Structure formats: structure tokens, C-alpha cells
Image (spheres, grey):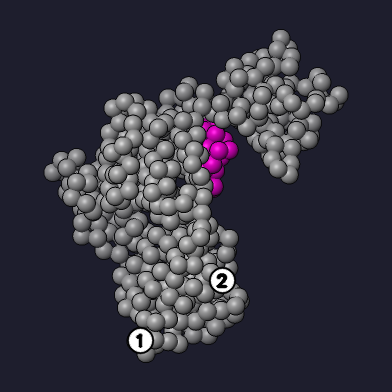
Amino acid sequence: MIKRNLGQVADMCGGTLAHEERDSNIVIHGITRDSRDVMPGQLYVPLIGERFDGHEFTAQTLAAGAAASLWEEGCPVPEELEDAPLIYVADTLSALQRLAASYREQLNVRIVGITGSNGKTTTKDLTAAVLGTAFRVHKTEGNLNNHIGVPLTLLQLDESIETAVLEMGMSGFGEIELLTNIASPDAAIITNIGDAHMLQLGSRAGIAEAKLEIASGLLPGGALIFNGDEPLLRERLAVITLPDETELVPFGSSDDCQWSAANVTVDADSSTFDVVSSQLSAEEQELLRGVFLPVPGAHNVSNALAAIAAAYRFGVSAAQIREGLAAVTLTGMRIQPVTAFNGAKVLNDAYNANPTAVRAAIDLVEELQGYRRKWVVLSDMLELGPEEAELHRGIGAYVTPEKADALLTWGTLAQYIADGASAAFAAAGRAEDVRHFENKEELTAWLREQLSSDDLVLVKGSRGMRMEQVVQALEN
């Protein structure tokens, strides 16, 4: 975590100490924006939102042990805080971001920034696992991937950390550009371009433009590791200006990708594949045959290729790459295999959903064999904009009788998924295998009665639909 005296902090964030002569040598140990979990010695950052003002809790936070606090100049200082160790700033959020950017400049750390429509968190976990075999590594925790979370993550870094893996999320133009210019990554990964945030960005081309903002913050000579199978990224790269000496590193299945996979096999718990790259020596190529990944799905093999490309650039050996991938533990609810009450296999993919991610999960279900019945349980995909009904119907059409034995849906928009699937299932004489339910409880109760111990169930929906409740009900 950051350890600096208040004089240094004021300089780094563009602030002014209220009592410079007295307080400049006070040392802060870390940052907090939450008055409820302050630790002794931390700097408190009172952020202002639509319905809250963190300044109201400054006295409480200082009393709980905070060493000092930022203070926005436009806010009157109450009498009880006139003698407190405060740093006056024009805007507390901007000061937090500036402090993080300055701290990053002072650190001897190499950073990988990760964005994309799908797979950011999985790729973050994979990249950190591989880098962790060779370096002291820190990765984004939880959902700290926005204009507040990325600065907080940087300020969490201990000065002994050698590499950091930062997830960068967004919902509109300009947000990734802000984050990448705070973090100044040595390498940036774009996992893919999907349909998430169509409501805000208007089109997949707009999404590609927004995701490619990550390149603007790359350090000179940095690497842009991108999905080479996405034409929109290649089209945009042909017309934008990149930082000096940026190396383009495509991964995927296209012929000109630097990193690709061969002999991919998957089951419900894992995947294996051979790494293919012109960057590898013959000995390294041999070491990266039959790589074991304890995560199912060809889309996760693609995520692993991005992690491998970043790690190899940072000097991680082929043997260490293999070791790191085999030992990875993913953040929950990303194709997470769990066991139902009767022994059936459930794939908990309930963290989030958009059309690209849902199709990838359905592809995985199609690949998996040896089950009595394969159930696909889907709910609404949110924030898709004016085309949301048609996009949901398209997912329904994608769930054919050849890919799954039954489709169960819940949610207002998910009705369109059921509608889209009905024709194909009816044509196969299996109209009854597409069912829409009015609530999760009804769906779960019905499925529990039908489920056999040798069945497979995929559960997926947007975060707001909380489809993990279905998984939990099937487990208990």
C-alpha cells in the first residue's frame, strides 16, 4: 500500500495542506473511501455522489484512526475539523486519480491492463496465475475496475510488487482512456468485442472504439495483445494512432495470429490444448503441448492465450506458464462447475451475460458429451439497447435441439429467448422442451423434479437477474 508523508501526498495529488508546517511529515499507510472500515494511519478520501457526501463522515473517520483526510475546497470546514490534518483539493475524485497516477510513476512495477466485452475477470485471473510463478503479483480484487476502483487498486500496491494485473471496465466512451492513462500499462489485453453496453455505445463498432482506448495509455514500447479474430479491432487499429513503438500481438485462430491453440479438448471441468506460436523455440513449443487448464470452454482457451502472450513478453518461461495455468483458481460464477443435490453437474455462469458470452456458453454445452440430458437455463441480458428483443430471439434461435436437450427461461426479456427457440424444437417434435417460467422459484422447483444425477445444467443471466439463486437452490 502507499506509504508517503502528507507533504508528498499533497504534491502528488495537487493539493494544499491546511497546516503544512505541522502536518507535512505525518505518514499515511494506505487509502480508504469508506468510513466504516478505516484502518489506523490511512488517508480518507471523502467522495461525493448523487445521494451522499463523504465529508459528513470525516470527523468520524479521523476519530477511528485515519491519519488525515482530503477535503474538497468548495465544502465548508466545520469548526470541529478546523485543526484537523486536511489536504485541500479542487475535487476529491480527481485528486484520488491523480494520486494513483503519480504513485504508479514512482513504482518499479510492470502492469497488464485488461478490457473486453467478455472474459476480463477470467483473463485477469489467468494472467495473474501465470505471472505469479515468476513475480510478486497483485491483481484487481472484486469489481474494483472503474474510475474509483482502478486508482484504489494502484494505491493498494506494495512497493515490493513486481507485476500488477488490472481489470478495466466501462459503460461509455472515454472511461477506458481515463483508466489506462492513470495506470500506464506495459501491456494491454483486449479479450474480445461483444454486445455488452450496446445501450450506451450504439453498435459493436462503437464498443471496439471504446475498448481500444486502452492502447492510449500504453508506455512507449508496450504491447497491445488483442483478439485477432475480431475484424472490428483490426479495422480500428488501421486508423488510430498508437503510442510510440507499440507492438501489436494478435491471438486467436486466424492465420496471422502470433498466439493460437491446437488440439483443443474440453470437458465440464477443464480444457487441454497445445500452444502454437512463432515466438516459441522448438523446446518451448514442446513444453506447451497438452497444457491443462482447470477451466472448461474453448473461449477460456482463448483467454488463456492472451495471458500466455502477456506472460511470455514479461519473461515467464514455458514451464512456468504451464505451471501457472494448471494451478489457476477463477473468481466465482464464471463457468464454475458445482454439484447439484443429486449429483448432477451444474455450470454456474451466473455472474453476467450478453449475447457473445451466452453463445460461448452454449457452444460449451454442445461440446460436452456423456450426459443423459443437457439443460440450458437462461434469463435476461440487460443493457442491450433498442435491439434487445431481437438479440434475445437470436439467442433462442442459437439454442437448437442439437446443442441442448431442453431450454428453460425466466425473465421479461427471456420470453423472447424461448420464442426464438420454439420453432426449431417444434420442428424436431420437442416443443415441450422449451419452457418459460414466471419466476425463478417455479423454474427451480420444476427442474429439481426432472433432474437426474447424470444430467448437465448451464445457468446464465445478467448480474441483475441473480441467477446464482437457481444454482444455490439446485445445490441444496
| Pointer 2 local density, CA inside 10 Å: few below 14, some 14–19, many at least 20 | some
Disc 2 on helix, strand or loop? loop
Q: How far apart are marks 2 and 1 (CA)?
A: 25 Å
The residue located at (50%, 39%) in the rendering is 175
Q: Which type of secondary structure does the marked residue at label 1 adopt?
A: helix
Q: Does the magenta stretch include residue 153?
A: yes
Q: What stretch is highlighted in magenta?
A: 141-157
Instruction: Identify the residue under disc 1.
Output: 427
Position of 389 with respect to 34 (left or right) is left
Q: In which quarter of the image is residue 403?
A: bottom left
In the rendered image, which residue does mark 2 sit on? Answer: 411
Q: Nearer the viewer, mark 2 or mark 1?
A: 1
Q: In this view, does 62 lie above or below 417?
A: above
* Res 454 → quadrant: bottom left
Looking at the image, which residue is at 73% across and 44% down?
51
User: Is residue 139 in view from this perspective?
Assistant: no
Q: Is residue 66 visible?
A: yes
**How many discs appear?**
2
Residue type at mark 1 is Ala
Image x and y of residue 468, in percent: 55, 65
Badge 2 or badge 1: first in the primary sequence: 2
Q: Residue furthest bottom?
A: 429
